[in-house]
Amino acid sequence: MQISDNLRGSIYMTLAMAAFTVNDTCMKSVTVEMPLYQALVLRGTLTMIALVLIAQRMGGLQLRMSRPDMRRIGYRSIGEVGGTAAFLTALKHMPLANLSAIMQVLPLAVTLVAAVFLREKVGWRRLSAILIGFLGVLLIVRPGSVGFDIWSLVGLAAVAFVVLRDLITRQLSPSVPSVTVAFYAAVSVTILGLVGVPVTGWVPITFNIAMLIAGASAFLIVGYLAVVMAMRVGEVSTVAPFRYTALIFAILLGWLAFRQLPDVWTLSGAAIVIVTGVYTFYRERQLGQRLATPETAPLRVR
């Protein structure tokens, strides 16, 4: 039986979300016994080695690029470093599913920021969905409630940094290989770890911790390659909503690994965010089809 490109893309995206969530689970387990920055150094080193080997099979790393792209890589690295540090710091102190629920607002945030700063057109329906989605985030975070703490804000800071990273990524030239972008990201995060190690210290590495870090690195690479394949073989508006499967995997692994489950408020807020996010993708697809009709000029989608 022949599988359509959209179905293959959806499978790849689901695989990517599962792999990223396993990576998060491994890192949360590691930071119970090991300082965060040491874990970043070890995971980053393994990831860089693996990416170099992958790049060799694909023709090598393209470390030299135009000056504008190098500048974009620099800004992207700021988003990567800030997002990684904020996310993993919050993850160390929060249930996995709760942080994952906060991160589900990312597609909505990217759409809103692109409309404000990149002048991308967003109609009133999608704008309304985005605002409702942010109300869902307030249900998850619940500022002023007993369950609210600083780590929820750190999770939101991670969203802000990742928005910067994703918007800059969209501006990179098509000639820049994805594996090169990933390599620079791994280098920047590893440097972050090296800067932080003198402050937090270095502890002996046990066999169990070594296996967890190796697993985190392996699943991180699988997730990255799968998400790239998903976006290349399927239509964005069809494939992108499968990012929300990350919450399902986070709830499952959070329970299996840490015996933690989100409360009703968190699940309700996450449901609102997911519904509004899927709606924005649906509207984007509708508008894309409408603009592609013979009566109007075709829309070029990057």
Image (cartoon, rainbow, N blue to C red):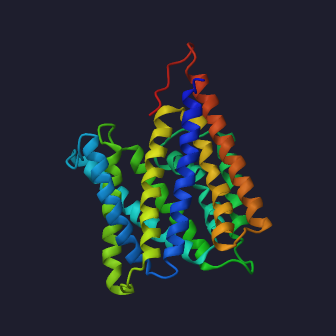
Q: Which sits in the foreground, 216 or 227?
A: 216
Please provide percent x and percent y for residue 291: 57, 23
Q: Which sits in the foreground, 152 or 132?
A: 152
Residue found at x 40% / y 50%: 168
Q: Which sits in the foreground, 67 or 217?
A: 217
Classify 74 as above or below 149. above
Residue found at x 73% / y 68%: 262
Say which quadrant the N terminus sits in.
top right
Classify 44 as above or below 29. above
Q: Which sits in the foreground, 130 or 204?
A: 204
Say which quadrant the C terminus sits in.
top left
Query: Looking at the image, which residue sits at the far top?
Result: 294
Please provide percent x and percent y for residue 122: 59, 40
Residue found at x 31% / y 42%: 177
Please provide percent x and percent y for residue 154: 55, 72
Please provide percent x and percent y for residue 39: 41, 74
Residue found at x 73% / y 60%: 269
> Position of 269 compared to 4: left or right?
right
- Report which quarter residue 144 is drawn in: bottom right
